[in-house]
Amino acid sequence: MSTGFPALDQGLGGGWPVGVLTELRAGRTGIGEMRLLLPVLAALSRTGRLIWVAPPYGPYAPALVAHDIALDHLIVVRPRTHKEALWAVSQGLLSPTVGAVVSWFGDIREQEFRALQRHAAQGGHWGFCFLPWGLAPQPSRLRLILESAPEGVRITLARKAGRPVAPLVVAL
């Protein structure tokens, strides 16, 4: 599915891959990391539910509406424990009524990440997982390293398989 950003679509080979848990790493929050997801989330919110698990900030409804996200299809989960967060992400990725799951983890073990990847593949959904900059890399099929740039966001793509892609800048 198209990212809504031609340069990123080209770097990804056509758009966001389905059935993949995409790992996103940003040096800090507020550099436009969510804006990269808004076009795909808007499209998916028209046909299925969006599950946000443990977002660091509450969703700002006026901005989401301005980007055509159907708020009645957005479910925000505020888990009390790491185990509850893993369960919520897993259930979302496996549910036939969910279009995408976006999650934020402060820490995650490799075996937990692999299990979530399997659930994304089984459910055939789009999964996006924000992880801290300094956390050890996970065995991701697709990792985006995000950095602030004067023009927008600089993205370095890392894939488990495939040709390397030079860093690109997406204007936001």
Image (cartoon, grey):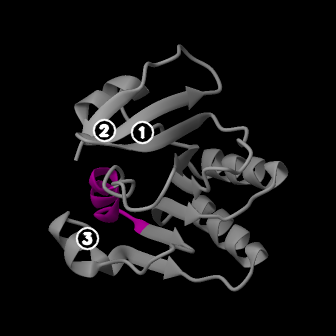
The one of 94 and 145 positioned closer to us in this rendering: 145
Q: Nearer the viewer, mark 3 or mark 2?
A: 3
- Residue 56, relative to residue 80: is it above or below? above
Mark nearer the N terminus (3 vs 2): 2
**Label 2 packing within 10 angstroms: few (<14), some (14-19), many (20+):** some
Name the residue beneath numbered marker 2.
2
Q: What mark, if any, has residue 16 been given in the picture?
A: 1
Q: Position of residue 64 (x, y in %)?
A: 25, 70
Q: At 53% from the left edge and 13% from the top edge, which residue is drawn?
A: 163
Q: At 16% from the left edge and 68% from the top edge, which residue is drawn?
A: 66
Discs 1, 2 touching: Cβ within 8 Å: yes
Residue type, label 3: Leu
Q: What mark, if any, has residue 118 been given in the picture?
A: none
Name the residue beneath numbered marker 3.
64
Q: Main secondary structure of the magenta part?
A: helix
Assign a secondary structure to mark 1. loop
**Label 3 packing within 10 angstroms: few (<14), some (14-19), many (20+):** some
The alpha-carbon separation of the residues under discs 1 and 2 comes to 6 Å
Residue type, label 2: Ser
Q: Which residues are magenta?
A: 38-49
Mark nearer the N terminus (1 vs 3): 1
Assign a secondary structure to mark 3. helix
Q: At 57% from the left edge and 17% from the top edge, which residue is drawn?
A: 162
Mark nearer the N terminus (1 vs 2): 2
